[in-house]
Image: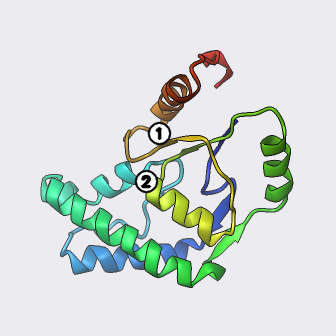
Amino acid sequence: ILFDIDGTLLTVDSKYNRSHLRRILDELDIDYPDMETDSFSGRTDHDIFTSFLVNHDFDEELYQQFKTRYLHYLQNVLLAKTERVQRHDHIDEALEYFFEGDFICGLLTGNYPQAAHIKLKAADIDRDFSFGAFGEFEKDRNKLPGLALQEVEKHFEFSPDPSRF
């Protein structure tokens, strides 16, 4: 069973999150005027953050600086302001059902792995997801189920039917 994070298990206040993203863009002198209006829905962190660099020749060093500051923000600001993270209704019951049953539970999310775990901690979702497919490793979110399949094959030595994804 694969769980998404943003919009499924929890929601981070988008106005609060975007204000911090804007602050990072400004601190790094990244010219990206559309950040406040761009849709992030269904996109990976990697895709979103590289799009910020369209006016900077997609500079890898600048991308890494942005990523580092973003993860620092999550670790040091979001965890201190957990009221900005809303757990969705009935998540505890759903997680308990799947974790107590005969299921292998993992994450499929556009987040970086570290960002995913910080958000789960901020929402007080304390579960041991066995594996994950994360947006750090693939820019195209539609390819994440294939990554999840590879992770299951690697960690559990069996191959689920891909048509079930």
Q: Looking at numbered disc 1 in the image, what kind of residue is underneath it?
A: Arg
Q: Position of residue 75 (x, y in %)?
A: 45, 74
The three-letter code of the residue at mark 2 reads Tyr
- The image position of residue 132, as x and y in percent, is 54, 41
Q: Which labelled disc corresponds to residue 118?
A: none
- 69 vs 52, nearest the viewer: 69
Looking at the rendered structure, the number of numbered marks drawn on it comes to 2
The C terminus: image quadrant: top right
Q: Is residue 165 above or below residue 41?
A: above
Residue identified by numbered label 2: 112
**Quadrant of residue 1 within the rendered picture:** top right
- Residue 91 placement: quadrant: bottom right
Residue drawn where x is 61% and y is 41% of the image: 130
Quick one: label 1, few (<14), some, or many (20+) residues within 10 Å? Answer: many
Residue at 41% x, 78% y is 20
- Tell me: residue 67, above or below residue 150: below
Q: Horizontally, is 154 left or right of 72 in the view?
A: right
Classify residue 133 as left or right of residue 67.
right
Task: Tell me which residue sits at (28%, 53%) in the image.
Answer: 50
**Residue 70 % position (x, y):** 37, 69
Q: Residues within 10 Å of mark 2 (few under 14, many from 20)?
A: some
Q: CA distance from mark 2 to mark 1?
A: 12 Å
Secondary structure under the numbered disc 1 in the rendered image: helix
Q: Residue at x 53, y 22 (%)?
A: 153
Q: Position of residue 8 (x, y in %)?
A: 68, 53
Between 42 and 76, the one lying in front of the other is 76
Q: Which residue is mark 1?
A: 141
Please tell me which residue lies in front, 115 or 142: 115
Which secondary structure, mark 2? Answer: loop
